[in-house]
Image: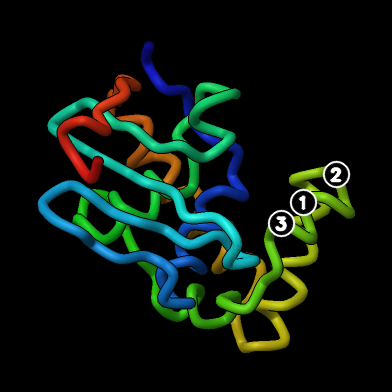
Amino acid sequence: MKLRLPPRIKVLEAISSISAGRIKKESNGVYKIRSSRGEKEYIVIIKNSTAYSDDNGTIFKGYIGYPIIAALMIEGILPKNEKIGEAIKGIPWADLNESLKSYKKVEEKVKEEAKKNGVQPDEIDEYVESVMEALKMITLKFKDMRQLGLE
């Protein structure tokens, strides 16, 4: 199954997870990412044009979830913006997603937080667009590859 493009907000969730130190490279193409609450740990495995992640967006909705995006940023395949990551690294993603129930509203909150930390909304929009454009150039197929990775 080919993974679809993610909602825009997943780009910001990915860069903040990197800046918050929640992503760890285990081996070549294998990562572990802690959730924003710290209660879950996602496994990401990327081999060539195939990817696996056990996050909800990837498994249940069929799009490139934020853990895969974060891993692709670490790999240098997608652009990273450390300034934006630092400005939003403390965002309580799970809490916002659950309480606001709208990615658009979550993005507005994230932009408010970033602005308090010196990053303007247009900088965020430009960055998200650059990552989304880069994602359009990538074809990733979903495959359960856990037997090749950590387990």
Please identify the quarter of the rendering in which residue 138 is found.
top left
Q: Which residue is mark 3?
A: 94
Residue 12 in view (yes/no): no
Q: Is residue 41 visible?
A: yes
Q: Which of disc 2 and disc 3 is earlier in sequence?
A: 3
Q: Tell me if 6 is positioned left or right of 106 in this view.
A: left
Residue 81 disc label: none
Residue 49: % across, % down: 19, 27
Q: Residue furthest bottom?
A: 117
Label 3's element? helix
Residue 83 vertical placement versus 28 (above, below): below
Q: Which is more toward the observer, 49 or 42?
A: 42
**Label 1 with label 2: CB-CB less than 8 Å:** yes
Which amino acid does the dot numbered 3 rest on? Answer: Ala
Instruction: Give whichever of 126, 106 is nearer the camera.
Output: 106
**Which residue does the image show at 26% across and 61% down from the upper left?**
74
Question: Which image quadrant: the C terminus?
Answer: top left
Q: Is residue 51 left or right of residue 48?
A: right
Q: Which residue is mark 1?
A: 97
Q: Amino acid at mark 2?
A: Lys
Q: Is residue 120 above or below residue 141?
A: below
Q: Amino acid at mark 1?
A: Asn
Q: Nearer the viewer, residue 80 or 68?
A: 68
Residue corresponding to mark 2: 101
Q: Marks 3/2: CA distance?
A: 10 Å
